[in-house]
Every structure is written in C-alpha cells, then in structure tokens.
Image: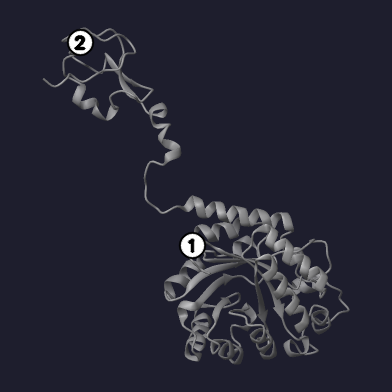
Amino acid sequence: MGKRNRTYIIAEAGVNHNGSLDLAMKMVAVAADAGADAVKFQTFKAEKLVIAAAPKAEYQRAATSDDESQLEMLRKLELDFAAHQQLQAECARIGIDFLSTPFDMESVDLLCDLGMQTFKIPSGEITNLPLLRKIGGLGKRIIMSTGMADMDEISAALDVLSNAGTVLADVIVLHCNTEYPTPMEDVNLRAMLTIQDAFPAVSVGYSDHTPGVEVALAAVALGATVVEKHFTLDRKMEGPDHKASLEPGELGTLVRSIRNIELALGDGVKRVTPSEEKNRSVARKSIIARCNIRKEEIFTAENIEVMRPGTGVSPMRWDEIIGTPAFRDFKPGEFIEMAPES
C-alpha cells in the first residue's frame, strides 16, 4: 500500500448499503469488478457516535427525512459483527482488501477482533485524542483523512499517533474536504503537496468528495499514493451519501483512468520511446536541393532547403553545408550529401 508507482484505490462503500448486508455484498462485488484495491465500510454504534439531540449535516438533511434525527438515521446504517465477518470473508474470497472505518472505541475493538492490519481514521475523528491514542497504540498501518483540519491539527494528530507507538512511515495522510459534494473551488488539491512537504515521514493521498473523477485523477498525477472515492449501486437510492457517490460504471472508469495515468507518468527519463521511433524519419526533415545544383557550385540558402522526410542530412548541420561546394550534381528534391572523406 502507498507505493508511489501504484496508487492504492479505495472504493468507499461507507454506509451506502443502507444497513443491508445483501446490498453491502453487492457493493463488494462491484468494487472488485471495477478493479479497486479495497472496499471500505464504516463501523460504529449509533449510540456511541452521537447524542440524541445531535443535528444532521446540511447534506444529510437534503438527502433524508426531516423527521428523522441523526441518531435515528445512523441506527439504520449500522452493520453488526456477523455482517463484518461475512463481508471480510467475501472480500478474501474474491480478492479485494476489506477495510472499515471505526468511529468509536468499541468499533476499534471489533475491527481488531477481525484481524485488521490497516485502520482508517476519518476526518471527524482527527481531534478525538482517546481514539487516536487507541489506534496509534495498535502498531498497524494507518490512513488518516484531514477534512476540516488545518496543519496544526494534522501535526497534533500525528504526534498523538507517534507517541502512542505508530511509526510515521506507516501513516498515509489523505488531503480531504468534508463537504458532499465538494465545490471545485474548495478542493485546494495543492494542499496535499503542502502536507507532504510539512511531514516528509508520511505518505500522502486524497479522499475525494467532488462530482466526477477528474479531481481524483489530478491527485494521482500530483503523487497521491492512495485515492479514496465513495460509490453507490444507484445515486437515486435513499440515504445521506448516495448523491455524492460514483455509480458502478463510473467507479470502473476511475480505476481504469488511474491505471492509465500511472502508465503515462513513467519514470521521468526523457528518451525516444519504441512507439515513436518509427515516426522520426517521417516527421523530421532533411536538407534537400531546391533547384539543379552543379558540381563545385556553392551551397546557399537560395539553392537548398529543408523538407520531409528525415532520412537525409539533418537540418541541424545547415551551417556546416552553407558556403561549401557541391561535390557532385544534385537535382531538385534530391537529398544533399556531405562530401565523402578522402
């Protein structure tokens, strides 16, 4: 995970299963079919996450019933331990990593019982000192989202993880904006590079909540080692996160596009590639005779010119030829040749 030559792609199922194990299983299959490296869910007990009077976020209000509290909404989106076990087993069976984000202490324990080796810290928990300390003490790989956080808060969270025993080389910090969907003018993708510069011991990535796929692709081009993107079986489904998620075909497009960008980034060495080698002689030019040139006549800008193909003397040798005598007769359009060495 996190190797710079291959982006680790997390298909974020989140709570888009609407509390249904059957839908969650279908999402695992969709993520695997799309070619994602991991499918990620969310692990929580609603009563441990919010108080009864906690308001919904604006995007949650827009996508769910006004009569339903955040607590009531979250209760319907829980997955129990048995569901986690079945999802993990299905992921192992079809060859995709299973991940889930814990939002409370008991959920951390649940994921530990499943043998999780990678823990995701969501943006909303980056200031949750007890949770950070608990996860930091596990000695696992950590992916931490930074939506709504400034650099000081990121630094403080990394200090907590480090002091708890986590090696920072095992941490991937995701730049993120916690608005669903994120307005383009608020993405500030260069902040990912700022995070990398400020904390060179960690790797960086991007958790994307914008519509479409282009910002996630730009993040890969900028060096994201991990990209996370919400997906759904159908954006028209009821629930808080569906409208800001990719549908299955779009998720496949994202994965294929990221893999193409990885190929296109290459190794940075400027060289003639095998695919373009055959075009050099076609696209480049040679020095040719503009008109009849007699033996011993001096080559000038008036009697020679540059034209395709590039199988003759290179125009870069123009100055070597101008002012020298022709060693034989040349016809119009004939390649100019240098006098043979005696």
Give above or below for 18 relative to 292.
below
Residue 268 placed where, x, y %?
40, 53
Q: Disc 1 residue type? A: Gly
Residues 122 and 105: in front is 105
Q: Number of callouts in the render?
A: 2
The C terminus is located in which quarter? top left
Residue where numbered disc 2 is placed: 328
Give the residue displayed 51% in from the left and 91% down from the top.
Answer: 164
Left-right relation of 111 to 24: left
Residue furthest out toward the right: 67
Mark 1 vs 2, N-terminal side: 1
Q: Amino acid at mark 2?
A: Arg
Q: Secondary structure at mark 1?
A: loop
Q: Position of residue 33 (x, y in %)?
A: 70, 58
Determine the secondary structure under disc 2: loop
Q: CA distance from mark 1 to mark 2?
A: 58 Å
In this rendering, position of residue 17 left or right of residue 270: right
Q: Residue at x 64, y 62 (%)?
A: 36
Give the residue at mark 1.
223
Q: Quadrant of residue 254?
A: bottom right
